[in-house]
Amino acid sequence: MKIFSFPGKKDTGVSARRIGISNLRNLDPFYFELLKGLRAKVEYKMDTLNLRVLAVSSAVAGEGKTLTAIQLAANMASTGRKKVLLVDMDLRKANISRELGIASDSGLSDFLSGSLPKEKILRNSVVPGLSVIVGGKTISSPTDMLAGDKFRSLLRELREQFDLVILDTPPILPVPDAVTISEQVDAFILLFRFGHTPHQLFRQAIDELGERKIVGVVLNGEEKKNDHYYHKYYGKYYQVSRTGGK
């Protein structure tokens, strides 16, 4: 997904800098339908299990969790049914700000260190209903900050302010951050990248969190079948949908 950054109006309390996210419909149509399917399943789980804070994580780095969290948040907000907040919890790398092509200052670490109030770290996006909190200044060991009362209090406030809070956490096994905040999170979605993560490491990550905390697993990077296969089963359908039924 291509990401753009836009300059915005002068700051007026809640940051008026607007984060650019490309139109989801510019994605490959088959992938876009899979993304909508993920959104539908997540929304169903939210409504039936009364979930408000959902963490997206993985066993190790490089499994695609950050892009998945961004795309899921944008897709969820684009329906107009939910007010969504996306939060970068990886204070060591500030991945979301890098993916969105914006500065990583004025983020979560700045709030937790006492440098900025909550109102200064909330940013609006070009997707109506979607707000973002970036990681802020990178911190080499943020675990104690995430375990502290200041973060707990912030998350309680965000629960009241948004219908869904999506947390993009660091990977589970290399660092303890995701496990540290697990009791404050309603549920986790885990990414598993096909051909990348050894099964025993994925099993270890599940054990670290506890199976009851995990509401779903996203398989990422599975080898796509050839174009003839998709044209045979999906081609006419997408052709009709893109031409308004002609």
Image (tube, rainbow, N blue to C red):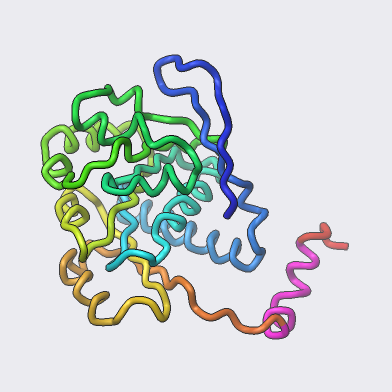
Q: Could you say where residue 196 lies in the image, as x and y percent from the top left? A: 38, 77
Q: Residue furthest right?
A: 246
Which quadrant does the N terminus fall into?
bottom right
Q: Is residue 70 left or right of residue 34?
A: left
Please report the residue visible at 23 percent of the width from the left and 62 percent of the height from the top.
172
Q: Could you say where residue 164 lies in the image, as x and y percent from the top left? A: 37, 44
Q: Is residue 229 magenta?
A: yes
Q: Could you say where residue 204 lies in the image, as x and y percent from the top left? A: 19, 74
Q: Is residue 55 magenta?
A: no
Query: In this rendering, is residue 77 above or below 63?
Result: above
Which quadrant does the C terminus fall into?
bottom right
Q: Could you say where residue 69 lies in the image, as x and y percent from the top left? A: 42, 53
Please report the residue visible at 41 percent of the width from the left and 68 percent of the height from the top.
218
Please report the residue visible at 21 percent of the width from the left and 63 percent of the height from the top.
174
Q: Nearer the viewer, residue 116 or 207?
A: 116
Q: Is residue 115 left or right of residue 83?
A: left
Q: Main secondary structure of the magenta part?
A: helix
What is the quadrant of residue 206 in the picture? bottom left
Query: In this rendering, is residue 215 above or below 72?
Result: below
Query: In this rendering, is residue 32 above or below 126?
Result: below
Q: Nearer the viewer, residue 184 or 90?
A: 90
What is the quadrant of residue 192 in the picture? bottom left
* Range of magenta residues: 228-241
